[in-house]
Every structure is written in C-alpha cells, then in structure tokens.
Amino acid sequence: MLKQLGHVKQHSLRAGQHAFPGDAPSARRRPPVVAVRASATPTEPAPAAPQQQPPAVTLDDSRTQAFMNWARGPASIRFAGVKPSTFAGIRGLAASSDIANDALIVEVPRRSAVVLAPKQRNSCPGMVTDDWWKGAPWFAKMGAMLIWHKRQGGQSPLAPWIAQLPADAGVPLTWSDKQLAALQYPYLQAQVKEQQREWSGLYDALRSSGMAAGAAAPSREEFWWAMSVVRSRTFSGPYIGSTLSDRLRLAGLVAALVVGNTALGLADPQKTLSAAIAVFLFNVLYEVILSRSLKQYAICPLIDLFNHTSAAQSEVSYNYFGDSYSVVASRDFKKGEQVFITYGAQSNDSLMQYYGFAELDNPQDTYVISDMLRWVEGFRPVPAARLQALRGSSLGAAALTNVVVQRAGFPAEALQALRFLLASDAEAAAGVSAFSKAGSTEAEALLAEALACVVTAELAAAPTSLKEDLALQASGSSGSGGKKGGAGSATAAEAMALSFRIEKKKVLSAVLKNMGG
C-alpha cells in the first residue's frame, strides 16, 4: 500500500504489490484511562445520529471532460464504476454503477503519475538550478515539478490533469489570523504559523538563488499553491528502483552473456552460470535492502480525487508487475455512493492542516494541550523547587507541554509529572522516577481531580462552548471571528474552522466522560 502523507498506518500487502502507508509523525502510545470522580461536568450533547452522505452531483464541465478523455486515452488510466462528482460542494469520486468488493476501481501507470524517486535528477530543466534541487525538501521539488508542467502548457503530457486542479487548495496555510483564531486551538494555530515561516523561507531561497538563468520566479502564492497540492495529494512508499521489465531485461542480458561466453569457450559453463546468478541475485537483493530505507513519492491523477474516511480499508498500492498504482474496493458500493479510501490513521490536526477538513467523530482524533502546567497551577500552586526538580529530571517540563490527549485519557509521561508535582514534600523526595506507576488511592483521586480541572479549564478557555458551536453549525452560521453570539453566513474557511473546533471539543468532553465526569 501507499501511504497518504499524514500519520502512518501499516497493512498487509496484496501479492505482487508494494504498499505505501503516509508520511508523518510516528504513532503515539495510547495513554492509560484514569478513573475520576470529577466535580465539574461538561455540557456534552448526545452523540449525533450518523449523517447521510450528500447526493452526488456529476462534474461535467469542459475541464473535467478533457481530463477524463485524457485519462481514458493518452494516460492509459484504467477505471471502472467511478466518475468525478461533488458532494455538498466537495470534489470526490462517486460510484457510476454498483462496485463489488475486491474489484479494481482505478489503475494509473507510473508514466502518467508525478513521481519523485530518491536522488532523482533535476526534473525541472531550465527552471530551477541543480544546486537548489539537491537541497530542497521532497515536497518543494514536487511543487516545482507541478509549476514546471503548468508552464509547459499544452506541451506537458499532464496538461489536462494540471488544468483541472483546484485553484485554491483550501488549507489553513493561507488563512488570515482571524480565520486561524476561529479554530480555537492554539496547537494547530502554532503549527500553521510554523508552516508559513518554513514555506516562506523555501520560497525566498528559490527566488534568490534557485532559479535557472533566464527563468522567472513563480509568485509566492503559486509556489505555496503547488506545495499545498502536493501535500494533499501525494502518497509515499518504499523505493522500487527497477520494474519487472527492467529485471527481465537484466535477466536476458545475463543469460545472453552466459550463452555467449559458453559458445565461444571463454569460460567454464558452470562457473559462468554461478557468477551470472550471483550478479542477478545481488541486484535484486540490493534493491530490496534499498526499499527498506528509501522512499518514493507519487501523485496519481484520478486517484487523487478519492476522499478519506477512517472507516475505509481501500488504499493505494503499487503493482510491481504492472508498474502502476491501483485502488481496489474493500467493500461493495452502490451506484451514486461516494467511494472513499483511507489516508491512514490521522488525527483531525493533520487532516485540517494538510487537507482542509475535519473528519466527523474521527476515532484517531486527539487534543493537544499546549500548556498544561498553567491549568495545573490554577488547580493547585506548584512550588518553584518542585518545578525545578521536574525540569532537571529525565522527563523535563516538556512532559506538560503539547500533551497529546486521547479520548481514553492522558499519556503516561504527563501522569507521572503530575503525580510528582501534586505529591507531598515527603513523597516527592523519592524523585520523579518514583511516580511512573499509580500511587495510593488518595493520590490517584487527587490526580484525577487535577486532570478534570485541566480539561474543564481548557474547554472553558475557548470563546464558544460545544453546545453553542453545534447550534451555529445547525443554523448554517459560523459566528463572528470566533466570538460568542456572532451570526451570519459562514465562509468556507469559517465553516471548516467551526467543524474542526466542534470535533476537538468533543474529544475533551469524551475524556471527561470517560473519567466519570
């Protein structure tokens, strides 16, 4: 399988295929559940009934038609039972006929995809310098490749696909400060700001010294657009240096050498055959070893229209024998239904930052508390000496910074740090390491009370409550700049921010509920 760039999720492979799971932080441990008798109880609405899929509206504009004609013709993309459509304004793929489980839905030849292999030579001749190409991160290289193809116009073999790409990737990268504030989530706001700084630096480097002689630099907006398209549509996976046809040619060459040397009497037949087999196996084994440490990246036209759901099992796989990328149905789909794949196990943080949406009731979702210590000190002042001891320990103060909370509870490191900070002076004398496991009933009750205070304070710090946000969403409003009581028609960014912060508050509310609050 391939992995959509995001959180990693491993799956078994189909015979003859290589999977590409997403490029993201390693999976975090599931934190322990902490039982608590919380005095503060959140206002948590009852779980919403499963939402019906919006009806599919077929895309039949001229650009989409040209793209589909190209896919069927020059691109040699095989597909059956799907058509580009919109679902409540969101582009995706709808089943144009019933699709059976395990049926091949789409198969894209490698030659019709945008692929970046390890140590690939400059793929933007005449546009960027070799030095820039060597030093640029993978997504900047692929972004440059998109811009290069776009500049080729009709001369590009990918022109019909490039032409139908959305002009706005719809991700928070380009949002205003006011729109980012509407997320009501300091952690993602900081991540987006850091992304903006990083991408600005990459653009400045390209503009100042990365353009080839005579080539005009793209605008900042175009460069960011290209990299946003890349980050939202690229899959990654093990590097496969040689295709089946490459290896068959190698085997044929080796066989010809064996026959030639034997016929001419230049070498002993048995020794020649043994040497030939050793050479062939060395090349195969060398590539197997390389595939474990090197990655390739690919954007596959048409496949890039599949939307994500955690409930899906279908993924993108590389078919070694066909040198192609494919998607196979993991269940039956009825005509008119949206056909989903999974991008891997990703929280709504990643989905919002790189894809521009939040998944409803995402089982992989988490909530990152940026500064947990401030809420702890609101519950009970912490002596300066105790904080100093925590900072000097192997845990460090970082155990209470950017704390990743799941519905099941808090990570072990944060629990250990809190046990130490809340302990009596006599107990704390044993050192931070002595608090890695649950303590007495009284100590754990105090810990649970502190955790409930932390979660309640984090919820209360948001400008709106979960109940208010759900009411805004039901009315079709997004509020005014994230402030209470606002009303009005929601822009796309405001609507996305609203749906995102609802999901985040649902995670915290579930944490309290699971702790007995």
Image: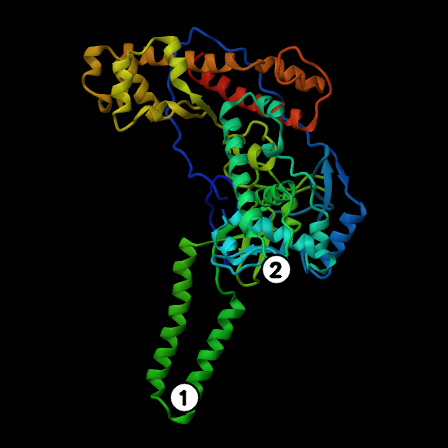
Specify few, some or many for label 2: CA neighbours under 10 Å numbering under 14, 14-19, or 20 or more: some
Residue ID at (43%, 6%):
39
Which three-letter amino acid code belongs to the residue tagged 1? Answer: Asn
Residue ID at (27%, 19%):
388
Q: Which residue is mark 2?
A: 126
Residue toward you, 457 or 182? 182
Counting from the top left corner in percent of width and height, residue 304 is at: 63, 47
Specify few, some or many for label 1: CA neighbours under 10 Å numbering under 14, 14-19, or 20 or more: some
Residue 204 at least partly seen: yes
Total residue callouts: 2
Residue ID at (40%, 89%):
262
Q: Which residue is mark 1?
A: 261
Labels 1 and 2: the sequence-earlier one: 2
* Element carrying mark 2: loop
**Residue farthest to the top?**
39
Within the image, what quadrant is residue 75 found in? bottom right
Give the foreground label among 1 and 2. Answer: 2
340 left or right of 189 in image: right
Cα–Cα gap, marks 1 and 2: 45 Å
Q: Is residue 183 above or below residue 245?
A: above
Within the image, what quadrant is residue 402 found in? top left
Residue toward you, 511 or 460? 460
Residue 104 at least partly seen: no
